[in-house]
């Protein structure tokens, strides 16, 4: 019996999950039962399909550097889209930048399973200064960014458009929150997604707790409400955006979050764009490369990278990872050499993700060390899509390229690095090949 049949025994074929007679029927009769099933089905945590990850170079590198690996499962996702659940809908109220929203969505996927609710997915909001950086304001089409079909065979989900087409008028029956209600987030949902909290009942649950008694109380108090809004960002996991322990540790919500990281993969379109870039710019679709994410934090730190002489002490007020400037080149060189020990000297390429305004600085510093950095740029993506697009969408394609790399080196702290790390771990890439630049003070 496949894992999904334990969670969703009514798995009849569905064309429209909102009108399916199954609608979750009697599955997950209690939170305890669902939790017991998940504990017994631990092999479900990692999911298969190593998009771009099965190259001979990656396999050789993995064999040379054994590390803890989240083993891929023997069982596939459900053969059809999963039905709408009896418990109602969970409408995640997401905020901050795109990667913060993605982390919040993964928290919602965990909560949806635990509360027997179908999760409403929505388009991802662009970073607040996207237009000022040369992109566009607005949102990214969820199905352009992510593989909706795959996700729908692991989790019960609907799009906002599907829910509206079935007659939902945008009114949230309740807002379930942990700690203070985040009014600014709710305001965004109200004005950008036409989801209103007018007349909604606000239910304060205190700090989120993944225990069965807490979840049972949540499920009971939310049961009268068909569509429930939940502000999510570091709520189900306190470090969901960055810093999640990349190992199976038996903690229910932690492990389910990592599981969701393997389910929420980029769309075939994004994968195709990344593949095309690798063929044209990175030496071929199977050529080995190191991907790095150079992310000074906070944004005010960027000014210090442009100065003729970098002063870590003076920059400390703006740079929370001021050590990054001093180490990223040498540490990249070390990992390039490590990869080339396996694939041959001079055969590894270097792909760089960073702020467009730092391209000149980073290129100069790498070239002084004998490296030739390769960037994916806004013009490249716009040529692929045939239209002007956002810096945020550019970042999503960059993440896919970084996911496929033989070695990924990220920056701490960064939600973008965090999303790449989490997916690489959940999809079975050895952690020896997913690292961050050192953060010595």
Image: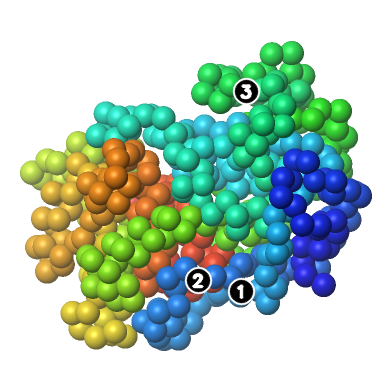
Question: What kind of element bears circle 2?
Answer: loop
> Do labels 3 and 1 touch, CB within 8 Å?
no
Regarding residue 92, the answer to whether it shows in the image is: no
> Do labels 3 and 2 touch, CB within 8 Å?
no
Extreme-top residue of the structure: 199
First in sequence, mark 3 or 2: give its number. Answer: 2
- Name the residue carrying label 2: 50
- Classify the position of the N terminus by image quarter: bottom right
Instruction: Using the numbered discs, state the Cα–Cα distance from disc 3 to disc 2 in whole angstroms.
Output: 37 Å
Residue 216 position within the rendered picture, expressed as x and y whole percent measured from the top left: 86, 41
Front residue (pair 40, 284): 284
Residue at the image position 29 percent from the left and 66 percent from the top: 278
Instruction: Using the numbered discs, state the Cα–Cα distance from disc 3 to disc 1 in whole angstroms.
Output: 38 Å
Front residue (pair 309, 129): 129
First in sequence, mark 3 or 1: give its number. Answer: 1
Regarding residue 16, the answer to whether it shows in the image is: yes
Residue 29 against residue 136 in the figure, above or below: below
Q: Residues within 10 Å of mark 3 (few under 14, many from 20)?
A: many
First in sequence, mark 2 or 1: give its number. Answer: 2
Front residue (pair 84, 175): 84
- Name the residue carrying label 1: 72
- Name the residue carrying label 3: 195
């Amino acid at each position: 019996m496949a894992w999904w049949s334990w969670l969703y025994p009514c798995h009849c074929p569905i064309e429209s999950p909102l009108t399916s007679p199954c609608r979750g029927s009697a599955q997950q009769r209690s939170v305890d039962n669902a939790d017991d099933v998940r504990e017994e089905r631990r092999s479900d945590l990692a999911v298969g399909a190593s998009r771009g990850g099965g190259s001979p170079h990656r396999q050789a590198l993995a064999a040379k550097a054994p590390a803890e690996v989240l083993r891929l499962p023997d069982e596939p996702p459900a053969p059809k889209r999963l039905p709408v659940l009896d418990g109602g809908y969970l409408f995640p109220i997401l905020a901050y930048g795109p990667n913060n929203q993605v982390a919040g969505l993964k928290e919602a996927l965990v909560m949806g399973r635990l509360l027997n609710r179908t999760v409403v997915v929505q388009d991802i909001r662009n970073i607040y200064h996207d237009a000022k950086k040369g992109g566009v304001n607005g949102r990214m089409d969820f199905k352009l960014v992510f593989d909706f079909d795959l996700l729908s065979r692991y989790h019960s989900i609907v799009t906002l458009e599907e829910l509206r087409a079935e007659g939902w008028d945008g009114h949230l029956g309740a807002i379930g929150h942990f700690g203070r209600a985040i009014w600014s987030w709710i305001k965004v949902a109200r004005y950008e997604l036409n989801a209103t909290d007018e007349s909604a009942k606000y239910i304060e649950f205190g700090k989120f707790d993944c225990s069965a008694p807490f979840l049972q109380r949540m499920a009971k108090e939310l049961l009268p409400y068909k569509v429930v809004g939940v502000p999510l960002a570091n709520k189900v996991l306190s470090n969901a955006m960055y810093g999640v322990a990349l190992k199976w540790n038996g903690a229910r919500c932690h492990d389910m979050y990592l599981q969701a990281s393997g389910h929420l993969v980029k769309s075939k379109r994004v994968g195709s764009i990344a593949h095309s870039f690798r063929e044209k710019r990175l030496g071929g679709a199977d050529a080995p490369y190191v991907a790095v994410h150079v992310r000074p934090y906070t944004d005010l730190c960027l000014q210090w990278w442009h100065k003729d002489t970098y002063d870590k002490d003076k920059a400390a007020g703006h740079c929370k990872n001021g050590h990054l400037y001093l180490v990223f080149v040498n540490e990249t060189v070390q990992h390039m050499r490590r990869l080339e020990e396996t694939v041959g000297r001079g055969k590894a390429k270097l792909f760089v993700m960073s702020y467009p305004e730092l391209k000149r600085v980073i290129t100069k510093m790498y070239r002084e060390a004998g490296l030739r950095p390769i960037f994916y740029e806004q013009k490249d993506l716009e040529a692929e899509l045939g239209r002007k697009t956002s810096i945020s969408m550019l970042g999503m394609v960059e993440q896919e390229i970084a996911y496929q790399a033989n070695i990924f080196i990220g920056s701490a702290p960064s939600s973008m690095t965090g999303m790449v790390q989490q997916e690489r771990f959940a999809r079975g890439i050895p952690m020896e090949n997913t690292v961050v630049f050192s953060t010595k003070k």
